[in-house]
Image: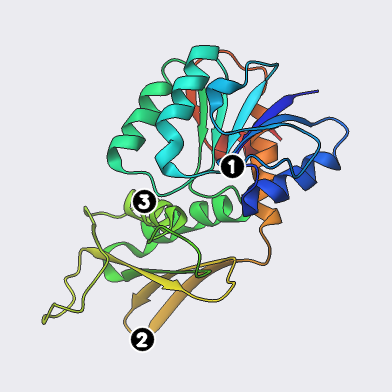
Amino acid sequence: MPKIVLSGCNGRMGRVITEICAAKPDMQIVAGFDLNTQALADYPVFAHPADYTGPCDVVIDFSNAALTEDLLAYCKARKLPVVICTTGHSPEQVAMIEAASKEIPVFRSGNMSVGINLMMDLLRKCASVLGADYNVEVVEAHHNQKLDAPSGTALMLADAVSESLPYEAAYVYDRHERREKRPPHEIGIHSIRGGTIVGEHSVLFCGRDEVIEIKHSALSREVFATGAVQAAAFLAGKTAPGLYNMSHVIAAQ
């Protein structure tokens, strides 16, 4: 039975992961990390990773990008695999994550949904077929409490398109100050924040007289939490350093 330490355990996603693991006889959360140390479940909560030295097979991180450095240091010191579900990392933090994967097993994905990862495969196919004849735009919508924009998923989807295009695409996040026709070799990325939207992502391929739209809507946070638990089960017990993502989990099923 994998023993999980959950970083961000008292946040929205942390509470959903706790519920999912509680219903699984083969998964156990043994401790949590959170600035709010109130124990909301049947495991202890610590404000700082270094305060917990008990058993652990894998760490799941659904906290905040600002805490990534300390969490990686903890995992490297204890040689623990870590599933990083937090988004909004700076380029420096991404480099830090990639460097850590040379010392420990690291799983990182901008979105834990199997559906989103399937969508990425479809986008690569569309981009390779449609090529330079279609303009690409990405639109994402989330609840009004989300801190980062655009979402990590939107960037992940844009990357999937970009790697299959016959040109190097420039990402554009804001056009309100521009007074010019749309350059052909760019991908527009747009963010909506409002209400309780869990997560919606659309990618539009806009051609002459037709638009192809591929869309994913998350109806609850459980879809992301389930993916995180699947990733933890996949990573638990691994000792060889490496950088993993959802495609590895899907391939192993």
Say few, some or many: other residues with alpha carbon within 10 Å of mark 3 (under 14 / 14 to 19 / 20 or more).
some
- Taking 130 as reference, is 119 left or right? right
Density class for disc 2 (Cα within 10 Å; few <14, some 14-19, many ≥20) is few
Q: Residue at x 18, y 76 (%)?
A: 182
Q: CA distance from mark 2 to mark 1?
A: 47 Å
Residue with the mark numbered 3 = 159
- Residue at the far left in the pictured view: 179
Mark closer to the chain start, 2 or 1? 1
Residue 8 — which label?
1
Q: In the rendered structure, which amino acid carries the disc numbered 2?
A: Asp
Q: Looking at the image, is mark 2 or mark 1 nearer the viewer?
A: 1
Q: Is residue 33 above or below residue 73?
A: below
Lateral position of residue 199 relative to residue 170, left or right: right
- Is any atom of residue 104 visible in this view? no
Residue 29's image quarter?
top right
Element assignment for label 1: loop
Q: Label 1 sits on what residue type?
A: Gly
Q: Secondary structure at mark 2?
A: loop
Name the residue that disc number 2 marks: 209
x and y percent of residue 195 in the render?
55, 76
Determine whether 163 is above or below 181 in the image. above
Three-letter residue code for mark 3: Asp
- Residue toward you, 139 or 167: 139
Quarter placement of the C terminus = top right
